[in-house]
Image (cartoon, rainbow, N blue to C red):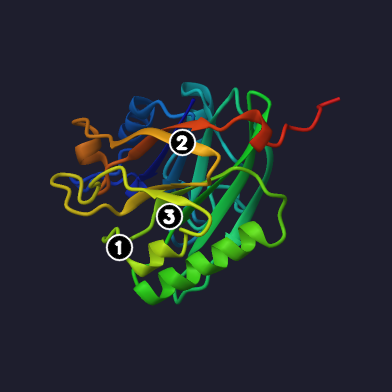
Amino acid sequence: MLKIGSYNIQKAIGLDARRRPDRTLKVIQELNCDVLALQEADKRFGPRESTLDRDTILSETDYRPVPFAKREKSLGWHGNAILVRNSIGILDFRRLDLPTLEPRGAVAADLEIDGIKIRVAAMHLSLVSHFRKKQITSLMHQLHEHLEYLPTVLIGDLNEWRDTARSLKLFEERYEVTTPGKSFPSPLPVGSLDRIITSPEFTVSQAGVHTSKTARIASDHLPVWAHLSLGTASHLAPAPDAH
């Protein structure tokens, strides 16, 4: 069983207009996920400095960030970061450019959990429908045309309000889209912008939106989560022998 989540932290700026990384970390620890994707983890300009301190994450939580950052002070790539428990192995990772008028990207990591390899990809898609479709098409191509196949989970802020949207249908040939619930805006959610998308080896046993008092003020998005179970071992690729 794996608990996976996604959280747009809005650069750690809460609804009170205060930047409070400590508050964001409190929500992350409340979530208690095994793997957690973050969006808007880094500032957009200058050195793209992270709003969460890497050393604090390492010293005060059971997580470490997948090393996507190309800049010393960043945590992720185009604001996308993935935190994994210390017990989870990071086998490989990659940054994925996505087509758009504004800087956007996705990230993917190959992880080892209890001897099993899986892939997790995290994204923050465009506000514009036309570009969302192009981004999903590009993402699918990059994940499936030149990489070894692995059971895969896609997570993130898709900026898509409708479950029936054409952009989401682009996933359906290979994946099942789970909408955990309404996550935006955090005080009174009306939109299900954050989703968890799984390949056939995974079963989603439970999914939801984290609605703690702290989460309702820490960002304009509420975090979403899902409990996943893996299929039978015959469907999965074993991790390479460390020896």
Instruction: Return the disc, 2 or 1, that comes first in the chain's sequence.
Output: 1
Q: Nearer the viewer, residue 148 or 235?
A: 235
Mark 2 secondary-structure assignment: strand
- Side of 21 where 215 appears, left or right: left
| Rendering coords of residue 118 (x, y %) | 62, 39
| Residue linked to disc 2 | 203
- Side of 156 where 179 appears, left or right: left
| Rendering coords of residue 16 (x, y %) | 18, 44
Mark 1 secondary-structure assignment: loop
Mark 3 secondary-structure assignment: loop
Calculate the distance from the C-alpha at mark 2 to the C-alpha at mark 3. Answer: 35 Å
Q: Which mark is residue 43?
A: 3
Residue 89 to residue 19: above or below: above
- The kind of residue on which mark 3 rests is Lys
The residue located at (60%, 53%) in the rendering is: 71
- The kind of residue on which mark 1 rests is Thr
Residue 237 to residue 108: above or below: above
Indicate the quadrant containing the C terminus: top left, top right, bottom left or bottom right: top right
Instruction: Return the disc, 2 or 3, that comes first in the chain's sequence.
Output: 3
- The kind of residue on which mark 2 rests is Thr
The residue located at (29%, 58%) in the rendering is: 163
| Residue linked to disc 1 | 164
Marks 1 and 3: in contact by CB < 8 Å? no
The residue located at (56%, 52%) in the rendering is: 107
Find residue 213 and report its image quarter.
top left
Calculate the distance from the C-alpha at mark 2 to the C-alpha at mark 1. Answer: 21 Å
Find residue 161 and report its image quarter.
bottom left
Q: Nearer the viewer, mark 3 or mark 1?
A: 1
**How many numbered circles are shown?**
3
